[in-house]
Amino acid sequence: MNTVRKGPEFTVARAEGVWLWDEAGDRYLDGTASLWYCNVGHGRPEIAEAVHRQMLTLDAYTVYGDFSNAPAARLSERLAAHAPVDDPRVILTCGGGESIDTAAKLARRFHAVTGAPERVHLISRTGGYHGLHGFGTSVIGMERFRTGYGPLVEDVSVVPHDSAAALEAEILRVGPGRVAAFFAEPVIGAGGVYAPPPDYFTEVARICERYGVLFIVDSVICAFARLGDWFGIERFGVRPDMIVFAKGVSSGYLPLGGVVVSGRVADPFWYREGHPFLHGTTYAGHPTACAAAMANLDILEREDLFTVSLEVERQLDGALRSLADHPLVAQVRSGTGVMAAVELTEEALAGRGITTAEVFAEARARGVILRPVPTALLISPPLTITWEQIDHLVSTLAGALDAVAARH
Ligand code: PLP
């Protein structure tokens, strides 16, 4: 038991490619790339060797004040070279939630030092997940993550995730001179895998620009080839003010995240000549994590997982269509990135008392790990998954649904 939560634990002991083994030696297909992040698959020796070499060269040195470290500097340059952000600068952190807090603080501070200190309001979307740090918990688009934590960050609101008009209406309601930033995932992940409607992000970018609102893309899940490109937003054709990343940057081999910031937003803080942005944490840009990320990005490029991912997206989408007619299934959401949700019907959930946890447990007993959220099973395998493995994942889920249906 390593949490404060009471309940069964599933302890993973070993992993390779898309496969996991528990302590009893039983094998499972990792249908979720752990928590959306193991894009290159498990057990890559190149990443382990890069981390080992890095430890022997420079074990640790914090990025702060006048200091950087060589792997952090190289990684930042490499990320900036690919980011769809104007004149990009990179702030490194230890993960997604920390990066969201960095972006939110930077947004408010940017307005404060550029003559608009009253611009503090933050807008996010229903179903949006932005981590569980202070700002992230406050802007999260799922009430259950906020409940019971007492007063959180003030001046936040949530708009429907599928309507750019709703964003504009909210900006006008709050007062255009009071809104600091808008947060959006390219495809909503933990909230249930919702891709944006056509032209949504073009409209959003136009609205943010019109009202002076910073447009912050949370690509913690979508970047590093899960949507077939570097930062998960390129296919929607917009250039945000900031992009938050984590997970796939190192495929989770070591904790790492960050924010790509446009020059326009970064410049007022530029070293020594500008205003201070007093923000940073001890392990941000840790050399070993950056070495893991560099080796991970080498794999993404060498194996062209950017292109492979688009084929996997098509294959997964095609295979999951077979579940659309299943009596327990209300909707299959897939086809934008290597991520999908199989939503159960109201009749199955409320009517027959079936839970997604039960379907998850049945699939796990049959050797496939999925992720249950209140009304859906989420799927986000490593991008290296083969067609046979996709077929195995989907047919195992179908079998699990049949078995659960037969019990109720
Ligand atoms: N943003 C998104 C879109 C996420 O999916 C997550 C984590 O799942 C986070 C932020 C938070 O990242 P972390 O768990 O590394 O703090």
Image (cartoon, helix red, strand yellow):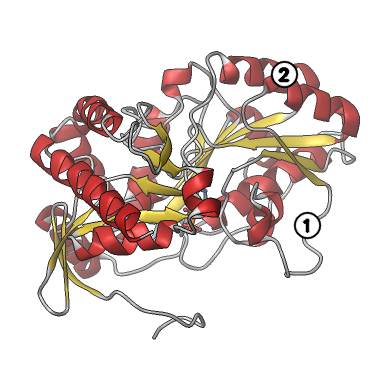
From the top left corner, tell me how far across and down residue 177 is, in percent.
89, 29
Q: Residue at x 67, y 23 (%)?
A: 163
At label 2, counting other C-alpha atoms closer than 10 Å, the crowd grade (few under 14, some 14-19, many 20 or more) is some
Seen at 13% across and 79% down, the residue is 24
Residue under pointer 2: 207
Q: Which residue is painted at 78% across and 57% down in the image?
A: 153
Residue neighbourhood size for the residue with mark 1, other residues' Cα within 10 Å, grouped as few (<14), some (14–19), many (≥20): few
- 316 in relation to 346, above or below: above
The residue closer to the viewer here, 126 or 243, is 126
Tell me where residue 173 sits by quadrant: top right
Q: As displayed, is residue 85 above or below residue 355?
A: above
Secondary structure category for the residue under label 2? helix
Left-right relation of 188 to 290? right
Q: Amino acid at mark 1?
A: Val
Residue in front for this viewpoint, 161 or 236: 161
The image's mark for residue 28 is none
Mark 2: C-beta under 8 Å from nearest atom of ligand 1: no
Residue at coordinates 25% horizontally, 48% vertically from top-left?
397
Quarter occupied by the N terminus: bottom left
Q: Position of residue 122 (x, y in %)?
A: 75, 42
Q: Which residue type carries mark 2?
A: Ile
User: N-terminal of the two: label 2 or label 1?
Assistant: 1
Which SS class for mark 1? Answer: loop
Q: Is residue 273 visible?
A: no
Task: Judge from the rendering whether residue 176 lies leftward or rightward of residue 81; answer left or right.
Answer: right
Q: Which residue is mark 1?
A: 153
Which quadrant of the figure contains the C terminus? bottom left
